[in-house]
Image (cartoon, grey):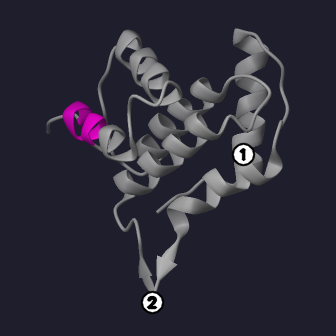
Amino acid sequence: MIYPSLEQIISDQAMIVQYTGGSPGIKDQKLLESAYYNPLQTFEGEELYPAIEEKFAVLCYGLGQNHSFQDGNKRIAVHTLTVGLEVNGIEITYTQQELIGLGLAIAQSQCSKDCILKWIEEHKKSI
């Protein structure tokens, strides 16, 4: 599995707000680290989120909910989700409106980790 570095997520957030507006930078480092490391947790040697889809759903949720960046939390959350799935060979199809809706639902606490996972499954490209 290819998992982004924390530095990559920080860099991507800066790039996103440069192009779409807002301020780059971290508002709360501890919340960012919490969102980042949560998908990698284990218990008694077993991964809590073994599937790639689960890991990126949990990461997306944490980035969207924790509001650890100055701006662009929803944008970095859905960006990290879609890019993370793609680099790991999981193709999803969606409209920009669907992606915006997902980001807003996460930020407004209307979409849980399970909801994001369901969204991924519903948007997986059929082969």
Q: Secondary structure at mark 2?
A: loop
Q: In the displayed structure, would residue 60 be above or below residue 45?
A: above
Marker count (numbered): 2
Q: CA distance from mark 2 to mark 1?
A: 29 Å
Q: Which mark is residue 16?
A: none
- Magenta stretch? 118-124
Q: In the displayed structure, would residue 118 be above or below residue 36?
A: above
Residue found 68% across the figure and 23% down from its top: 72
Say few, some or many: other residues with alpha carbon within 10 Å of mark 1 (under 14 / 14 to 19 / 20 or more).
Answer: few
Q: Is 117 left or right of 42, judged from the image as shown?
A: left
Residue 27 point in image, percent of width and height: 83, 36
Furthest toward the bottom, the residue is: 44
Q: Is 33 left or right of 110, judged from the image as shown?
A: right
Instruction: Classify residue 71 by image quadrant.
Output: top right
Q: In the displayed structure, would residue 98 be above or below residue 67?
A: above
Point out the frontmost of discs 2 and 1: 2
Type of amino acid at the residue the image marks with label 2: Glu
Q: In the displayed structure, would residue 107 be above or below residue 8?
A: above
Residue 73 point in image, percent of width and height: 65, 29
Name the image quarter holding the C terminus: top left
Residue found 73% across the figure and 12% down from its top: 19
Residue found 51% across the figure and 31% down from its top: 78
Type of amino acid at the residue the image marks with label 1: Gln
Q: Secondary structure at mark 1?
A: helix
Residue 105 point in image, percent of width and height: 43, 24
Residue found 40% across the figure and 17% down from its top: 101
Residue 67 point in image, percent of width and height: 68, 34
Q: Which mark is residue 8?
A: 1
The residue to which callout 2 is attached is: 44
The residue lying toward the viewer, choosing from 127 and 80, is 80
Magenta segment, prevailing SS (helix, strand or loop): helix
